[in-house]
Image: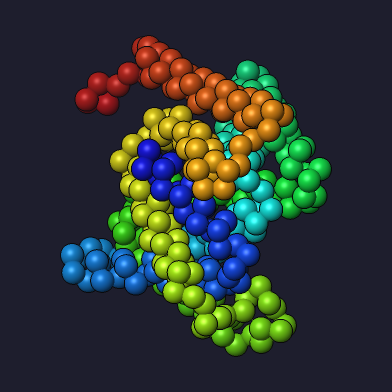
């Protein structure tokens, strides 16, 4: 997860560099094409399992659609917003997952965590407000990324233990290419410029496109491995390292730093999110250590 928190913002920085140089459709197709080209030979050489049951395959298809939408929305947001601000706003995701768990899955959520969730949303508004004044509605795009990625993470957790991480990413990359390539190459550029394909891009631009594909592939492999081998309660606090790392990368590459209001909002988001994480860990430990009622104990004969 620490590797993901370093590699993912680096890929986002590359996408921000290219956001006004390459059409979104071309960027996405190359990104997922590189993923498939890198991982399919690895599966062939190592004999890894890539075949999936019908249920897992259908969930992987849905996950792939969400992956395409999520990356496309994030790249669009980075065209308008500083790197750290966009990622900080997207970190409303843990609060959305908490609400989904409560209202959709019927999970019990105490008042303290609901209050922390509300405070976290308030922090998000602190980050959005100056960005909204400057760029308007595109400042809300990271919120769409957060909702999409919350559902994406739920799906990934659901299938991570039933699939090989490399096999999952290879199949997902091939699915994404199969979905996007016909649209990009058959729809006229004049009809949807966002899907235009340019063969005459400079070598430096193609190099950055390949780098986006490699970094995206590695980042999501690292995330899938982390979800496979460690409980989410252990991983969740580490995810917040992505915000300061993105701030450092944003300053180093673009000279961007969050303003005072955005910095306060980021601090509130991180504090609220970590409170929810550690509160859930404390409740989990308390539940695990609770004594079992006598009537619930069964002998081997029973």
Residue at 55 percent of width and 58 percent of height: 17
Q: Quadrant of residue 70?
A: bottom right
Q: Quadrant of residue 204?
A: bottom left
As drawn, 251 above or below 302: below
As drawn, 128 above or below 175: above
Please name whichever residue, 154 or 22, is drawn nearer the observer in this view of the structure: 22
Is residue 35 shown left or right of residue 130? Answer: left
As drawn, 128 above or below 275: below
Residue 301, how many percent across, how many down?
22, 25
Residue 14, how many percent across, how many down?
50, 57
Please name whichever residue, 27 or 256, is drawn nearer the observer in this view of the structure: 256
Model colouring = rainbow
Residue at 57 percent of width and 23 percent of height: 271
How many marks on residues?
0
Please name whichever residue, 261 or 145, is drawn nearer the observer in this view of the structure: 261
Residue at 60 percent of width and 42 percent of height: 256
Residue at 59 percent of width and 68 percent of height: 21
Please name whichever residue, 182 or 105, is drawn nearer the observer in this view of the structure: 182
Residue 19, how many percent across, how many down?
60, 62
As drawn, 27 above or below 86: below
Is residue 216 shown left or right of residue 113? Answer: left
Residue 253, visible in the rendered structure: yes
Is residue 138 shown left or right of residue 282? Answer: right
Tell me the quadrant of the picture where the N terminus can be found.
top left
Residue 25, how many percent across, how many down?
58, 72
Residue 154, visible in the rendered structure: no
Name the residue at the left extreme.
Answer: 46
Tell me the quadrant of the picture where the C terminus can be found.
top left
């Amino acid at each position: 997860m620490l590797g993901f928190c370093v590699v993912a913002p680096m890929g986002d920085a590359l996408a921000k560099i290219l956001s006004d140089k390459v059409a979104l459709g071309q960027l996405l197709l190359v990104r997922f094409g590189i993923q498939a080209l890198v991982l399919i030979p690895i599966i062939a050489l190592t004999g890894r399992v890539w075949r999936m049951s019908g249920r897992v395959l259908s969930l992987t298809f849905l996950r792939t659609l969400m992956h395409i939408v999520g990356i496309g929305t994030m790249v669009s947001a980075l065209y308008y917003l500083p790197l750290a601000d966009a990622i900080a706003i997207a970190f409303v995701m843990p609060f959305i997952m908490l609400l989904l768990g409560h209202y959709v899955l019927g999970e019990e959520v105490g008042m303290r965590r609901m209050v922390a969730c509300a405070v976290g949303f308030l922090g998000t508004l602190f980050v959005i407000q100056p960005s909204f004044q400057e760029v308007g509605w595109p400042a809300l795009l990271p919120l769409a990324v957060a909702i999409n990625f919350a559902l994406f993470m739920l799906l990934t957790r659901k299938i991570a233990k039933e699939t090989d991480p490399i096999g999952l990413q290879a199949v997902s990359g091939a699915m994404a290419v199969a979905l996007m390539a016909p649209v990009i190459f058959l729809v006229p550029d004049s009809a949807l410029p966002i899907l235009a394909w340019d063969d005459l891009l400079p070598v430096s631009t193609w190099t950055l496109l390949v780098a986006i594909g490699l970094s995206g592939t590695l980042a999501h492999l690292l995330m899938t491995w982390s979800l496979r081998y460690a409980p989410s309660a252990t991983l969740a606090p580490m995810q917040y390292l992505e915000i300061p790392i993105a701030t450092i990368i944003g300053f180093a590459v673009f000279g961007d730093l969050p303003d005072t209001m955005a910095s306060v909002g980021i601090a509130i988001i991180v504090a609220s999110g970590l409170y929810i994480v550690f509160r859930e860990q404390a409740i989990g430990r308390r539940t695990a250590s609770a004594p079992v009622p006598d009537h619930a104990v069964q002998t081997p004969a029973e």
